[in-house]
Image (cartoon, coloured by chain):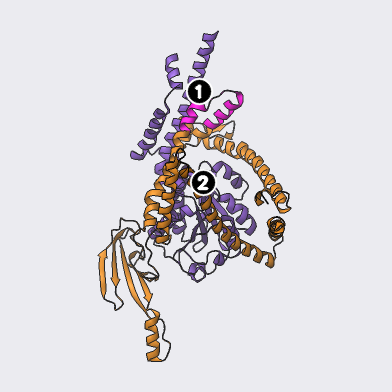
Amino acid sequence: MDAFFRRIVALDRRWIFLVLLVTLFAPIACPLNLSGLKASPGVSAMYNHVEGMKEGQTILVSFDFDPASAPELEPMAIGIMRHAFRKKLKVVAMGLWVTGLTLEKKIVEEAAAEAKAVYGVDYVNLGWKPGSVAVITGMGEDIYSTFPTDTKGSAVGTIPLMKDLRRLKDFDLVVSIAAGTPGIDTWIAYGADKYKFKIGGGTTAVQSPAMAVYLQAGQLVGLIPAMRGAAEYEFLLDRPGTGTKGVDAISLGHYLIVALILLGNLAWFVTRRNAAGVKA
Amino acid sequence: MIFLKRQFPLLICFAIGVAMALQYYVPTTLGQKLASQTSDWYIIITIFASFLGFGSVASVHWRKVNARRPGWGYSALVFVGIVLMLGAGIISEGKPTTERAHDEQGTELPPVDERDASGVLLKRTIATERIIPDLVSKEIVEETAAPPPPKTFKVLELVIEYAPDGRVTKATETKYSRSGAVLLKRDRDISKEGALLPLEGEPTSFGWMYQNMLNPLQSTMFAMLGFYIASAAFRSFRAKSFHSGLLLVTALVVLIGNVPFTNHIWSEWFGIHHLRGVRLEMPDIVGWLMNTPNTAARRGVGFGVALGIIATSLKIIFGIERAYLGGGD
């Protein structure tokens, strides 16, 4: 038994990589549809806020992430866009991360095509501008001067949807789907707190404990945390997507890491005790 | 010269710092104008700063390549990457797809819908039109001696057909010449991305590199973290003391509790819903950990960071902290 635990302590990490790879891939290849998915308070609050908005109200969605975080954040971004178009809200998209610009365009246009939304009337894509803090404060004062043109090159002030949207407080809701900084905290510190507009967010698993502070303080109307949050949002939307598919893999990954931690500690305790016994 | 190098930057810093602080707390029209103006300046400075960043990166890697230091090949690859991506970006004008909306394919017009008696959408026609170039308009002006309205012609028409359940069944694209003759008529592959967008073109070299190089590379780099975390957790996360044991138990509860299936086991298999009248499902336990000890610690850190930022900002505004001015004379 001692030899077994010694081997465990000295286990080559490549075995761990292999087991984790199989654990993550298996449920993607053969979905398990594990039950128990239930919307957490932050996700429910976000969903209920969007659901409570009236047709024609406006939502600004800021895609503040890059391809590195796309697998975790894209499902919730799609979920928010689908919900907004389903509710016939007027959607304005933008981003604070330059490497996320192409992702943003793809998500927005696919969701719009799916919802048969018309560009300029139902949605607009403002794109990206450098200087995240300056962009937010600039939009707080005057969107037309911060974004003179949209991604198609049209003057923003001439787009029908943008007619009554001159500054950030004109939006009924701002949503930042963010992988880090600039992101939700930047929008709150330089935007929502100063220009007084409602903001919700979605973020990665690493960032969500930090953002929970804003949710608890009421500075966020809702918060979608990571892949699980996206799956919960899809569950509320009654429209399973990549978040729901991914949550099985994430679940098994979590269980595996817990098992590895327990096994590692057990092996460490046993070998340490035996070593102490030999010395005595 | 000393004044320009030392006192003048400090003066600018003091004036801007005080003005920006005042405009935040004293909301006046002048303050709003100032904020808007400085935001524009900030954006312009950021663009120039990116050139500075590029120069810094290039200098570091060039020295490594020049001295043939270990790993110099990776530094050389940095230049290859920069040149390729920058070149593709400039050629493609930073656009991921060939959007010829305003010069070749025209401007998108509002869609025309056909619906059945119950209002279900059956067919949508989206057209794009172009204004006849100025030269032609001028000729018309001379002939008629009166300014005519801008003349337009249809460039492209996309007809999307829907099944009663809302599914797209067909998308037909027709391209027209200026005289109205059909140049091309074809069915689009509706399974392809962007098939329902009238103005969408083919991926540019920049778009292709983004989609097929940057996207998978960044995702792979981030995904690899998961493997290292799993390995590190197995090898290093040990309950060596009371505090590390406490951290370990908390981490295990959060890890397991965040899995939806755990709640199913907890409440359905074990039947635990309440304990002495208090709701005690797994999300409640995780929620308490996240909302009470976590937020308390986060707020403490947040206050510390905020106070540090305020102190440093004041030191910079009043010229006590001058490290940003650099060394030398």
Query: Which residues, given as a range, are shown in magenta?
Result: B229-252
Q: Is residue B329 above or below residue A4?
A: below
Tally of numbered discs: 2
- Judge from the rendering whether residue A169 lies leftward or rightward of residue B107; answer left or right: right
Q: Main secondary structure of the magenta part?
A: helix
Residue linked to disc 2: B60
* Chain coloured purple here: A
Indicate the chain coloured orange by its letter.
B
Q: Determine which of the numbered discs, if any, sits on residue B211 in the image.
A: none
In terms of secondary structure, where does tag 2 sit?
A: helix
Q: Which residue is label 1 attached to?
A: A265
Q: Amino acid at mark 1?
A: Asn
Q: Measured from the top left, where is residue A235 in percent x and y?
A: 44, 46
Query: Which one is in front in this view, the residue at disc 1 or the one at disc 2?
Result: 2
Task: Measure the alpha-carbon separation of dots 1 and 2.
Answer: 43 Å
Q: Chain of mark 1?
A: A
